[in-house]
Image (cartoon, rainbow, N blue to C red):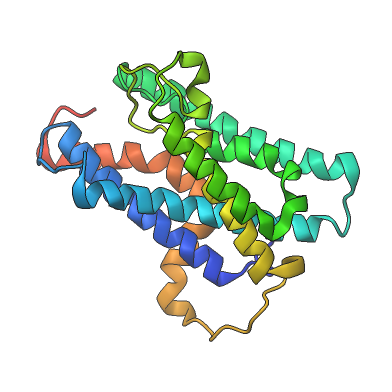
Amino acid sequence: MSGRSRYPEIDLLRGIAIVMMIIFHSIFDLTFFRIVPFDISGGFWRYFAYATASLFLLVVGISLTISHARAVSHLHGRALVKKFLIRGAGIFCCGLLVTVATWWYLQEGFVIFGILHLIGVTIMLSPLFFRFRTWNAVIGIFFIVLGWILATVPGPMGLLVFGIHPLTFWSVDYTPVFPWMGLVLIGMAAGEFTYPGGERRWVLPELPSRAIAPLTFLGRHSLVIYLVHQPLILLLMYLATGAPVI
């Protein structure tokens, strides 16, 4: 969406998710490099990580619905599908950059199929689901339930994308299609209900632009921030503590 046609509340939500992500990754890095111990395997910080990823993916779904509703006014058939294939492929390639970077930096536990990979795949698959409109909420719940079931089933690395993996597998970011694509589908259903035809259903109170400007800025540039925030966190940790993190 162009700057004029953006909805500030969506950029605000995405910006909040960015801040939550930066906080959690900072906590994760402090623990991973044994600088300050936090319990990130359970309790508050584990649920905080789930809430962060969930908010991101819900907003992805809402944004997809708005984008599709506006695109159908001038694109049809293969051209419409191509739009989402190209966009999704671009984000998936950004995910591959994360894979290469984490493999080079971490070796063990590197990202094979993280949140950017998932978002890219979901965008490419989204033309299959737009037709279901608000019924995507039901499909999304099915994805989530199936994901919980598949998480208990060990299997080969070839099924990693779907949530099945060897018992010894671990990654610093693992976001398989089941259950996580279910949240995007629920977001698509929410977008269909709250922004029918790409237009906001209700008039919202005007948000104080100066107060929310930092968060909406982050929301408008979320992909770039996602790609650069970890190296910056590591650099700041090194400068602050001298710990061997880079």
Q: In which quarter of the image is residue 151?
A: top left
Q: Quadrant of residue 186?
A: bottom right
Residue drawn at (49%, 79%), measured in percent from left and top?
209
Residue 21 picture location, percent across and down: 35, 50
Location of the C terminus (image quadrant): top left
Answer with left or right where residue 148 lies relative to residue 6: left
Q: Nearer the viewer, residue 51 or 223?
A: 51
Closer to the camera in the image, 31 or 50: 50
Question: Would residue 8 be found to the left or right of residue 132 on screen?
Answer: left
| Residue 44: percent from left, percent from top | 21, 52
Left/right placement of residue 148 relative to residue 199 reads: left
Give the residue at x 77% y 43%: 83
What is the x, y in percent for residue 67? 71, 56
Residue 173 visible in the shown view: yes
On screen, residue 43 above or below 154: below
Observer-nearest of 215 and 239? 215
Vertical relation: 238 (above or below) 134: above
The spot of residue 42 in percent (x, y) is: 21, 43
Q: Residue at x 50, y 81 (%)?
A: 207
